[in-house]
Amino acid sequence: MKNIKIYNKIIASLLLLFSVSCTDDFLDEKPLSFLSPENTFRDGAGLQTALDAALRGVMTQWNGDTRELMFNHNMSDASVVASTDKPDAFVDLRTYATPTNARNNDAGRTLSFYADNYNHIKKANTVIDYIDLPDWENGVNNSERNHLLGSAYFVRAFFYMQLTMQFGNVAFPLNVVKEARRDFKVFHMQGIWDQMIVDLEYAVQHVKPKGQLPIGQAPKDAVRMLLAKYYMLNQRFAEAEQLMTDVINDGESRLFTDAMIPSGVTEVEVANTNNPNTGNPLPGRSGFAPADAVNYLHMDKGAQKTSNPEGIWLVVNEPFVLGTQGQAARIRAWGPNFVSTNLGVWEPGTTRIGTDVQATTNDNRGRMMKKWGRSQGFARPTNYSQYDIWNYNGMIDEQDYRHKDLNWFEMEDVLYDNPSLQDDGSPFYLQPLQLYDANGNLTCQDTIRCWFGYPRYKFYSVNLESRPDRQDSGKMDMYILRMGEVYLIRAEARLWQENYAGAAEDINAIRERANAIYMYTASDVQSEGIGAVLDERTRELYGEEYRHDELVRISVIFAKTGKAAYNGKTYTLSGNDIEKSLSPNNFYYDRMMEKNSFFRDEVRWATYNTTRYTMDPMHIFWPVYQPYLVGNVEATLNQTTGYAGAGSNIEPLTHVVQPAGVTNEDPMRAVGE
């Protein structure tokens, strides 16, 4: 009887449906899904959802211990891949940087940089394609419409900058891919940049300033910063300089200084002085450093970063808040692997592990891990970033806040805390770690991964949520773009214009804030050239910038301008294919051979003696994973110059720039095909 009643209700419902639907409109096609574009993007809120999904793509590159930002940094002069348990890592590039290497984690991220970036671009293209589905008041003059459109242009340009700096000439979809396509075509990167410039010029006019946006959205000043880098690719240096002057003068953000530290704040914690689980003291030195502009700027406590005036664009990632990102694990990624079951630091004179790897929340075990974090050494600094940039005429600058005691972690800050040492009465128990024993023998097999210093102040956060027993850094807010970089972008723009005094002034604005012992003169900048800017970017932005991409961008500028680099070399372009021209000869490679001793000296791993750091000029760009190309059977997508399969490459298309402010036409047709 119950089933009969349900059946009768269904029939009645169907009859009611047909009784109100039997008109001519009944024959019109209707979307079967409630998630059709017409339903989803009928107002600004729907479009904002798609934009937020694209923005989240940026945040996933930053957040987590093996993400794209770290790999990009590791392909630079400042740090290297140090995952010495993976012999096929992007270390021996001659052997393993191949179109068939499927590695996609802490040891290599070329796959996700390529595939995920196109996925994020698709989300931005969604906003652009459907921007006029809503019935906007005043149409194309509606400010909310134009802000959303400009923001989508910004995100798309953000990812196309990466793709062209990493892979050279690439596919260039400007519309949502609504169905399976096998006809993507390759474009010269120059045309891509030209389109991004037009789009970003529109975005600068319409994207809202920081003060009118929720934290986490990209504001007008972020657009200006990205546009300045695109301008410099096209040798528009004066316009790039003016954009950064606009950011400095608009009052939306300010360089944070000692004078801005809140009254009464005298210390900033950069390590766990007490067990965060019990509150009891941990052995060793205090983790509180005297407060300064740098450690307070990067202090992860409450909403400090999101309210700090220096931040322009941030990842918001608060613990115990639903909808935020996952565990940041920045200490785990960027710190040395001194806590290990087999490759940590030994008790001097033995091969017994000196630190305790036991993960518990109580006070008895893993005390150094709780204090300094269970770092795993997925990225390690080069000698250049760890030592050279702090050396001024034989004097080590430990006055600079970015390199001062405690802000900068040293291995000797860690104590031997393996309980077995105490049980055996070892004299080393609770004494500082040491690299050599009394006979001059190393106390760890793997110095690449297990022994180095790094700027701890910017990676530390207490882990209260996911693994409080390990303290490898919990959720944390992170700067994507901030005022410190603005001054360094302007310094670069001024340098290209041979305004050495102006470039020195901007570099010194950062150095004065950091309390550095030496200030640059115009003569210094003229002598060191772009090296002065790159060195200061390393000091200021280690672990924060897409360092590989910055070096490639500068390599393009050297080749376009023909200006002599500080190394005395000049670089040129042959024809209109920038990728082909840079592949055999470029500033990036020469800078790597100068500053990155791991690649220059082809340093071998202790864990796998057949693995060594190798690099050639072609490695300025990365290989495209072969499966991403083979399915494109109706057209040819190029493999990066120099890699297997590149012999079948075709001449890339030249993009015809389209106006901003309206939906794009598929560039495959825009070139007349």
Image (tube, rainbow, N blue to C red):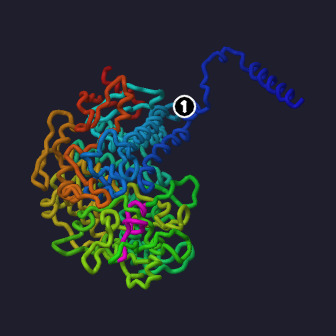
The image quarter in which residue 155 lies: top left
Residue 31 location in percent, x, y? 60, 25
Label 1 crowding class (10 Å Cα cut-off): few <14, some 14-19, many 20+? some
Residue 110 is one of the magenta-drawn residues: no
Which residue is drawn at the image coordinates 9% and 53% (left, top)? 568
Q: Is residue 305 left or right of residue 134?
A: left
Residue 106 location in percent, x, y? 39, 53
307 shown above or below 260: above
Q: Quadrant of the N terminus?
A: top right
Residue 44 location in percent, x, y? 53, 39
Q: Which residue has dot 1 on it?
A: 37
Residue 342 location in percent, x, y? 40, 65
Which residue is drawn at the image coordinates 21% and 44% (left, top)? 556
Residue in the foreground of this view, choosing between 541 and 61: 61
Span of residues in magenta: 330-347
Which residue is drawn at the image coordinates 40% and 38% (left, top)? 118
252 shown above or below 649: below
- Residue 431 visible in image: yes
Residue in the foreground of this view, choosing between 467 and 571: 467
Three-letter residue code for mark 1:
Pro
- Say how many tags the image has: 1
- Residue 407 visible in image: no
Residue in the foreground of this view, choosing between 670 and 620: 620
Q: Main secondary structure of the magenta part?
A: loop
256 shown above or below 25: below
Secondary element at tag 1: helix
Q: Is residue 505 left or right of residue 265?
A: left
Residue lying at the far right in this picture: please name it. 1
Q: Quadrant of the C terminus?
A: top left
The image quarter in which residue 650 lies: top left
Which residue is drawn at the image coordinates 26% and 48% (left, top)? 93
